[in-house]
Image (cartoon, helix red, strand yellow):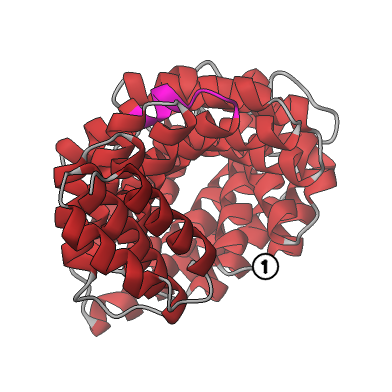
Amino acid sequence: MKKIHAYFLCLLCTLFSYSVMSAPSLSPRTYNSLMEIQSKIDETLTNETVKELDQELKEMAEDLSGSSLGLALTLQTHAQLMVKLERPNDAIRLLKKAVAIEDLDAATANQMKIFLAQMQFSQADYLGAISVLEPWLKSMDKTLPASAYAMLAAAYYSTENMAVGLPYIEWAITLSKDAKQPWLQMAFSGNYQLKKLDRALSYLDMLILNFPEVAQYWNQKSGVLQMQEKYQQAANVKELAYKRGYLTQESDIISLVQLLASVDIPYKAAQILESALQSEQVKRSEKNLRLLHQAWLQSKEIEKAKAVLQSLFTMTRTADDGLNLLRFQIDAEQWADALLTAKALSSIEATKEQEGKILLFYGIAYYRDGNIRKALATLGKATAYPAVQAQAKMWVNYVNATTPM
């Protein structure tokens, strides 16, 4: 709360200084009195000082009832005191009086409206802020301040009326010389919520151009492109962000890998994930290793897929992973490795079906490695398992037929 009041106190001080400097009709006496009061407000206030300043400002307001500028600045200074005392409702009451004064010069009147609306916005009186700003701003005048249009848009957004607020924030962006990140974010979110995806992308492009280090904007652009079913473009956006060093979070990298794999670029996906695992940008978790395994498989890089599966089996020690690894090793005719894996599997909890497959592959590996006795013994055990019984018997017959007596 103190930060909010400090912010508005600063704004009101700015208003006071601007209005005084641009007001030749303000009398020296009024000018000096207001400057002295302001200097006291800037200091640490005691209860006695507060009472004195409050009374002095009330008396000045009565005396200046015939001077539009003097009265407005007095009310503004009084509002400044209320902000310092964390009495925003009293500050709003005083600023409303200032805004209602007739014959104020346009610059002072406009600034009073802005700060009244800002105070109302700070108190969540969004409709009040709209009622102050909209009658003044609806002409979309290029000479009016961009910040006022942005505030009007924010007030409408806060009432969940983006459709009305969106043109105001877009106009504020048009008027502004500099790219303001919060305004561009508002324009993007408004267009996105209203399903104007092409316009949403245009504001994301502005955000990326001016604030490329923010990974969120690259991710959002990729997401919008995916909503438009432009998956290749979405993958390109994420990959570019990764190459430039803007995607560093694990979730972002995993999302990129999955997207690349989905658009049939699995080799690049595997390369990125393997590099991220090595650099520890991504945890060497079971889930991530499985993703890497699938990417290498999809790329037809069988040896690399097998190496990852070996790591998975070492990590999980499950029968499923061990059997998958064993199949790869047998297909590759790596009999010594297959025997080691089969031996490890023999001590791991498995279902009856898995036990039968382990014995079958174990027996085949023994046979191909030249150990006929153990091959026949192991394959004989496999024949007791219905799931592999036929295959096991076929292998027993084959081994007997090809083995010299």
Give whichever of 208, 389 is nearer the camera: 389
How far from the left and from the top, in percent, is residue 20?
44, 36
The residue indicated by pointer 1 is 125
Magenta stretch bounds: 263-270
Q: Is residue 273 left or right of residue 144?
A: left
Is residue 105 something that shows in the picture? no
Could you tell whether 325 is left or right of 178 in the image? left
Using a 10 Å C-alpha cutoff, classify the residue at mark 1 as few (fewer than 14 neighbours), some (14 to 19) or many (20 or more): some
Q: Quadrant of residue 379?
A: bottom left
Image location of residue 120, percent across then percent down: 62, 63
**Residue in the picture at 48% in, 23% down:** 208
- The kind of secondary structure element at disc 1 is loop
The percent coordinates of residue 43 (x first, y second) are: 19, 62
Q: Is residue 265 magenta?
A: yes
State the quadrant of the N terminus. Answer: bottom left
Q: Quadrant of residue 82?
A: bottom left
Instruction: Tell me: 356 left or right of 150.
Output: left
- At label 1, the amino acid type is Asp
Q: Nearer the viewer, residue 49 or 234?
A: 234
| Magenta segment includes 67 | no
Count of marks overlaid on the render: 1
Q: Residue at x 61, y 45 (%)?
A: 114
Quick check: can you spot residue 214? yes
At 33% from the left and 19% from the top, the residue drawn is 243
Does residue 343 appear to the left or right of 259 in the view shown? left
- 278 vs 95, nearest the viewer: 278
